[in-house]
Image (cartoon, rainbow, N blue to C red):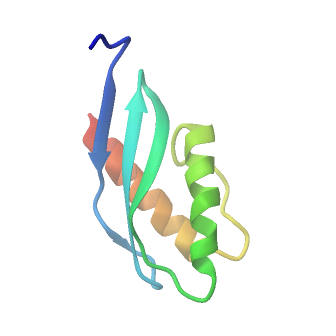
Amino acid sequence: RSSNGSTKTATGDAVESGYGQVQVKVTKTNGKITAVDLVQAGATAGREQAFPYLQQYAIDSNGSSFGNLSGATYTTDAFKQALDSAISKLG
């Protein structure tokens, strides 16, 4: 099986948002984030609805440099920390 570039995957540390643990697995292909999978997505009171948006924002911005999701500041902050943790493990 031939590969046209490098794909790396890493799982970051779990981060406590105040509403539950957030942990993500990041897949990068040729230096671009192609997938952000939720390993743990603890959230309460509807905050879990933020995760699909945050996953898309991370892919679109190729990292954690995106704005907070309205009404989900703690969840967004924890997601960004979890994302940065996973990205740092990719080397």
Res 91 seen here: yes
Q: What residue lies at 34% left-to-right and 27% top-to-bottom?
A: 7
Q: Quadrant of residue 40?
A: bottom left
Q: Indicate the position of residue 24 as horizontal and vertical percent values.
A: 38, 57
Q: What residue lies at 36% left-to-right and 43% top-to-bottom?
A: 87
Q: What residue lies at 26% left-to-right and 43% top-to-bottom?
A: 89
For the C terminus, give its image quadrant. Answer: top left
Q: Indicate the position of residue 77 as horizontal and vertical percent values.
A: 52, 66
Q: Indicate the position of residue 32 as horizontal and vertical percent values.
A: 48, 29
Above or below — where is 73 with respect to 27? Answer: below
Above or below — where is 6 with respect to 27? Answer: above
Above or below — where is 60 with respect to 11? Answer: above
For the N terminus, give its image quadrant. Answer: top left
Q: Quadrant of residue 49?
A: bottom right
Describe residue 78's horizontal placement relative to residue 72 as left or right.
left
Q: What residue lies at 62% left-to-right and 49% top-to-bottom?
A: 57
Task: Please name whichever residue, 24 or 82, is drawn nearer the observer in this view of the structure.
Answer: 24
